[in-house]
Image: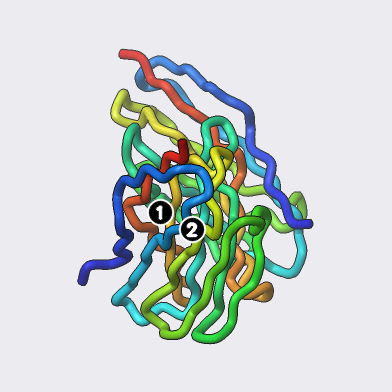
Amino acid sequence: GDSVTQMEGPVTLSEEAFLTINCTYTATGYPSLFWYVQYPGEGLQLLLKATKADDKGSNKGFEATYRKETTSFHLEKGSVQVSDSAVYFCAPLYYNQGGKLIFGQGTELSVKP
Amino acid sequence: NAGVTQTPKFQVLKTGQSMTLQCAQDMNHEYMSWYRQDPGMGLRLIHYSVGAGITDQGEVPNGYNVSRSTTEDFPLRLLSAAPSQTSVYFCASSSQGVGYTFGSGTRLTVV
């Protein structure tokens, strides 16, 4: 079945460090790709999206590029802040399968001052 | 707009009891889904729907039923609660190209 693999956490960084969280997905059909973020004790918020190959999604300094040839959607940020501490989920959405959105296991990010 | 509304926010059930988790959205979204979130396991898809009268099973459907009689509502029924169903449940809705909007969750404990 469809699956998504994320870089394992927890990831601990110092403030202003560069962040990469790797994500690869199965390429059944042509999914739209999303990153969601979950802050401690809260629900899920949409962080960014990309709907076709080579699209770059961006929000709050985070970016991710839809790489169809490598079935990847890696999340990056040039300079993380303490407030970025959260769990990040990569999620492909398969509209051709009834709108099925599946999640990676999540990557916990902790940013230290 | 209220977005996606889940009720109740917290619930404690005894083993064997049944209950319905309610989910409603006011955005006229055609897609709706239910997930459970357990520590260290991310979110797992229980059931999903592409519109009224159409539902499908996700990764972990056993022990749960759904129906979608209207565009707005997508209730999740636990038929006979088990301790393994202790979890946080999220409902979400989407329209084509928009991405899913999530409710605030229901924390369920089965004792």
Circle 2 chain: A
In the shown orientation, is residue B19 left or right of residue A103? Answer: left
Can residue A35 be seen in the rendering of this structure?
yes
Q: Which residue is mark 1?
A: A46
In the shown orientation, is residue A29 left or right of residue B21? Answer: right
Does label 2 lie on the same chain as label 1?
Answer: yes
Residue A49 is labelled as 2
Residue A107 at x, y percent in the picture: 54, 32
Counting labels gives 2
Q: How far apart, in angstroms, are the residues tagged by discs 1 and 2? A: 8 Å
Circle 1 chain: A
* Residue nearest the viewer, comparing A15 with B19: B19
Q: Please name the residue shown 40% across and 32% down the image.
A: A86
Amino acid carrying label 1: it is Leu
* Residue nearest the viewer, comparing B105 with A59: B105
* Residue nearest the viewer, comparing A111 with B82: B82
Q: Please name the residue shown 37% across and 66% down the image.
A: B23
- Please tell me whether residue A50 is drawn above or below residue B44 in the rendered image: below
Q: Please name the residue shown 69% across and 68% down the image.
A: A30
Q: Residues within 10 Å of mark 2 (few under 14, many from 20)?
A: many
For the residues bearing labels 1 and 2, Cβ distance under 8 angstroms? yes
Q: Please name the residue shown 28% across and 67% down the image.
A: B3
Residue A69 is labelled as none
Which residue extends farthest left? B1
The quarter of the picture where the C terminus of chain A appears is top left
